[in-house]
C-alpha cells in the first residue's frame, strides 16, 4: 500500500486540475484554465481552428518567476499539438488548425504553470461524418 501524504489539494504539482464548477470558478481556476474556443460542430477531415487561451477569464502572470511553460491539445486521448512558451516572451494564447480523421472524444487542452502545476479544460464538439 502506498502512503501518500500529499493530496492534489495540498500539492499544486500533484495531478491534473480541472474546474469543479464552471459557474463558480475560483481565482486560481480563472487564471489557469486553458479555455478552448472551437466550433460546436465540425466535419471529419475538414480543417477548423481551435484557440486556446490561458488567462482569458483572469490574467495570469507572465514573468520569469511565474509563467505558463506549455500548452497541449488532445482529442479524447489522442495527442494533437504542443507549444512551448518562454516567460515574458510570448502570451499563453495559441491558434491551432485541426483536422480530425479518426480521433474522437472531447477536445482537451492542458497547460503547465511553473508554480501552479497542470490544468485541463474540456470542450465537447460534435464530429459529423
Ligand atoms: Fe500560475
Image: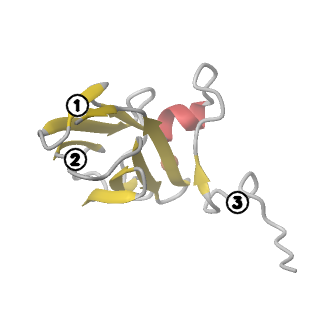
Q: Who's the residue at 45% across and 56% down the image? A: 112
Residue visible at 41% across and 41% down in the picture: 106
Mark 3, residue position: 11
Image location (x, y in percent) of residue 76:
41, 50
Question: Mark 1: which secondary structure?
Answer: strand
Q: Mark 2 highlights which residue? A: 100
Please name whichever residue, 118 or 73, is drawn nearer the observer in this view of the structure: 73
Q: Is residue 119 above or below residue 53?
A: below
Distance between mark 1 and mark 2 Cα atoms: 9 Å
Q: Residue at left 49%, top 46%?
A: 120
Mark 1 and mark 3: span between their CA atoms?
Answer: 38 Å
Residues marked 1 and 2 touching at CB (< 8 Å): yes
- Which residue position is annotated with label 1? 42
Among all residues in the image, which is located at the extreme front?
A: 129
The outermost residue toward the bottom is 1
Q: Of residues 86 and 36, which is closer to you in this image? A: 36
Of the two numbered discs 1 and 3 on the same chain, state the one appearing first in sequence. 3
Residue 53: image location, x then y, percent: 33, 37
Amino acid at each position: 500500500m502506498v502512503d501518500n501524504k500529499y493530496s492534489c489539494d495540498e500539492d499544486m504539482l500533484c495531478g491534473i486540475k480541472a474546474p469543479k464548477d464552471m459557474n463558480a470558478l475560483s481565482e486560481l481556476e480563472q487564471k489557469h484554465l486553458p479555455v478552448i474556443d472551437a466550433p460546436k460542430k465540425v466535419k471529419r477531415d475538414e480543417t477548423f481552428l481551435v484557440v486556446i487561451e490561458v488567462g482569458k477569464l483572469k490574467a495570469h502572470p507572465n514573468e520569469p518567476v511565474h509563467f505558463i511553460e506549455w500548452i497541449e491539445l488532445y482529442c479524447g486521448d489522442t495527442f494533437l499539438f504542443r507549444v512551448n512558451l518562454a516567460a515574458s516572451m510570448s502570451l499563453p494564447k495559441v491558434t491551432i488548425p485541426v483536422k480530425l480523421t479518426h480521433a474522437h472524444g472531447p477536445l482537451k487542452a492542458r497547460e503547465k504553470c511553473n508554480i501552479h502545476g497542470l490544468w485541463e479544460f474540456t470542450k465537447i464538439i460534435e464530429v459529423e461524418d
